[in-house]
Amino acid sequence: MPREDVNDLLAFLAVARERSFTRAAAGLGVSQSALSHTISRLESRMGIRLLTRTTRAVSPTEAGQRLLLTVGPHFEEIDAELEALTALREKPAGTIRINAAEHSAKSVLWPKLDKFLPAYPDIKVEVTLENALTDIVAGRYDAGVRLGEQVARDMIAVRIGPDWRMAVVATPAYFARHPPPQTPHDLTGHNCINLRLATYGGFYAWEFERDGQKLNVRVDGQLAFSSSTLTLAAALSGHGLACVPEDMVQSHLAAGELVQVLEDWCPLFSGYRLYYPSRRQSSPAFALLVEALRYREQA
């Protein structure tokens, strides 16, 4: 349908509904004479009269009434759908896909999502757990969560968690059988529980630092997992030493279920960041989520 036919039909609908050229012209923002010319042109093109004009009123003819009842609702549906799309753009709604490692999801992401989501029932969040530096653009993720030093420079990064460090732990019963390590080098004589991380191309090398000296120690033992949760469970069962995020073991240390060693050798990491492409167009839902996740130091 030519564009002029659409415009002319909209003009006819306005007059037929208002039953007045004056009110219809005011609503359309055109002059009465221009509107009258438009209706005449439509009637001429269709070869049938659509409106009956008198000095007091304007009313649809039988053909005009039929056109009003059949065509009018379709334009109303189009208007309603356009309004709905506009509302969707302005309303916090939609699905947000995030790629994160296990510890970041459990310690930072989930506690904040747990509080955020009930207030926004139209926002959906899908979290994929991967212990690897995934290409979030290729994976079609909206954002990722990684340590600050792991985020590429071309990404926007928002800090969402505090600094943290790893802890080397084992049960009191284990240390009753094996002397606690005094330096990272002593780990070679212990049964250590390995953590496999795809990012490192194999097992995670336990990271240590003291007095400016950095050490990455490749440990060995009977068990290896790709999950910090299972690594901790194995340590709690007395299978050896584990190197896991310190926040995961605080309650076990307080309860005397685990003993921490090499504490002065475990460095701080710079906290987790939510990162996303700089060219990403921020939706209301995504903008709200970023603010909800943003880390704010407590006074």
Image (cartoon, rainbow, N blue to C red):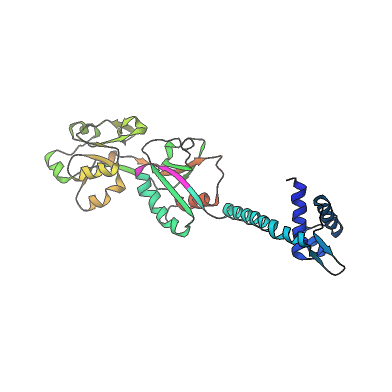
Image quadrant holding the C terminus, namely bottom left
Majority secondary structure of magenta residues: strand
Give x and y (percent) for residue 297.
43, 52
Residue 182: name its quadrant.
top left
For the residue pair 183 and 220, the one nearer the viewer reads as: 220
The magenta segment is 96-102
> Residue 135 at x, y = what percent?
45, 35
- Which is more toward the observer, 33 or 8? 8
- Would residue 250 appear left or right of 275 to someone viewing this image? left
154 over 119 or under it: above or below: above
* Left or right position of 52 against 175: right
Task: Please tell me which residue is depicted at 25% across the width and 44% down the height of the picture.
Answer: 232
Q: Quadrant of residue 116?
A: bottom left
Corner quadrant of residue 188:
top left
> Which residue is pictured at 30% across the width and 38% down the height?
226
Q: Residue furthest bottom?
A: 56
- State whether residue 247 appears in this view: yes
